[in-house]
């Protein structure tokens, strides 16, 4: 992996206000991925592939990342960035809406990372549970969403996102096959481990 290019990709994304993984969030995920050394990762929401590239260094030698992105422009940028970072052999970009793509997928993953349309998180979760390996980990970013999720936020603008995230938290807490913790890093990180 080309670390110099990765840093450039990060700076470019920040300059363009493209949301990418915050450093403290990456640090928390870092510990998890180091521990499990995943063979297969599924990422829902590629954007410019910053997190995708970051995750590559934790993969097993033969490991692969499947990453889903619906925005055509972002897919083009992601492909360029993946090439720049010299990880194109380890990444498979799937262009399409995750809502339509996920039900057609049947692979099993060690780690599933959710960072896409906040209102769709509950749907992403049910697909993730279907595809996660025993002892695998489902990670959801932005779970506290600017503090709105735990507050009494009810404004129209973000209502769908907030409602979706609240439902996601409820679902992971009630699911007895998941062992979940919510970390107050970045914009909130939910880590759910599939029990044996």
Image (cartoon, rainbow, N blue to C red):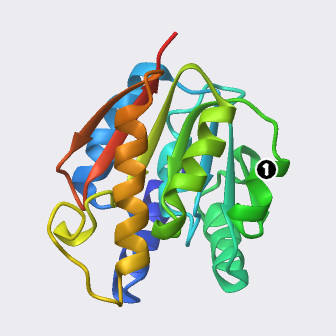
Q: SS class of the residue under badge 1?
A: helix
Indicate whether 191 appears above or below 161: above
Q: Categorize mark 1 by other alpha carbons within 10 Å: few (<14), some (14-19), many (20+).
A: some
Q: Percent position (x, y) of residue 178?
A: 43, 26
Q: Residue furthest top?
A: 196
Q: For this view, does 150 lie left or right of residue 30?
A: left
Can residue 86 be spotted in the picture? yes
The residue under the point 20% across, 76% down is 153
Q: Determine the residue positioned at 50% across, 33% down.
A: 58
Against 175, is 79 above or below? below
Who is closer to the viewer here, 156 or 179?
A: 156
x and y percentages locating residue 176 in the rendered image: 43, 22
**Residue 83 position in % (x across, y down):** 68, 63
> What residue is shown with label 1?
103
Name the residue located 43 percent from the left edge and 81 percent from the top edge.
18
Left/right placement of residue 104 relative to residue 78 reads right
Return the residue nearer the eye: 41 or 9: 41
**Extreme residue toward the right, this view:** 104
Seen from the viewer's position, the closer of residues 146 and 159 is 159
- Is residue 33 visible in this depiction of the protein? no
Number of numbered discs overlaid on the protein picture = 1
Q: Residue at x 70, y 44 (%)?
A: 90
Please state the horizontal and vertical placement of residue 61, each as a whole percent of the image: 66, 26
Residue 29: quadrant of the picture: top left
């Amino acid at each position: 992996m080309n670390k110099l290019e990765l840093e450039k990709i990060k700076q470019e994304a920040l300059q363009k206000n493209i949301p990418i993984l915050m450093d403290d969030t990456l640090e928390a995920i870092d510990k998890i991925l180091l521990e499990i050394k995943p063979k297969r990762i599924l990422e829902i929401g590629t954007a410019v592939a910053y997190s995708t590239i970051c995750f590559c260094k934790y993969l097993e030698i033969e490991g692969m990342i499947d990453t889903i992105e619906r925005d055509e422009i972002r897919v083009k940028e992601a492909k360029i960035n993946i090439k720049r970072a010299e990880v194109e052999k380890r990444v498979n970009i799937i262009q399409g809406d995750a809502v339509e793509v996920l039900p057609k997928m049947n692979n099993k993953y060690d780690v599933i990372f959710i960072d896409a349309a906040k209102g769709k998180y509950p749907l992403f979760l049910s697909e993730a549970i279907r595809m996660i390996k025993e002892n695998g980990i489902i990670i959801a970013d932005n779970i506290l969403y600017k503090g709105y999720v735990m507050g009494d936020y009810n404004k129209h603008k973000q209502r769908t996102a907030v409602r979706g995230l609240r439902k996601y938290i409820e679902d992971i807490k009630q699911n007895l096959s998941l062992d979940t913790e919510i970390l107050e890093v970045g914009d909130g990180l939910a880590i759910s481990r599939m029990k044996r």
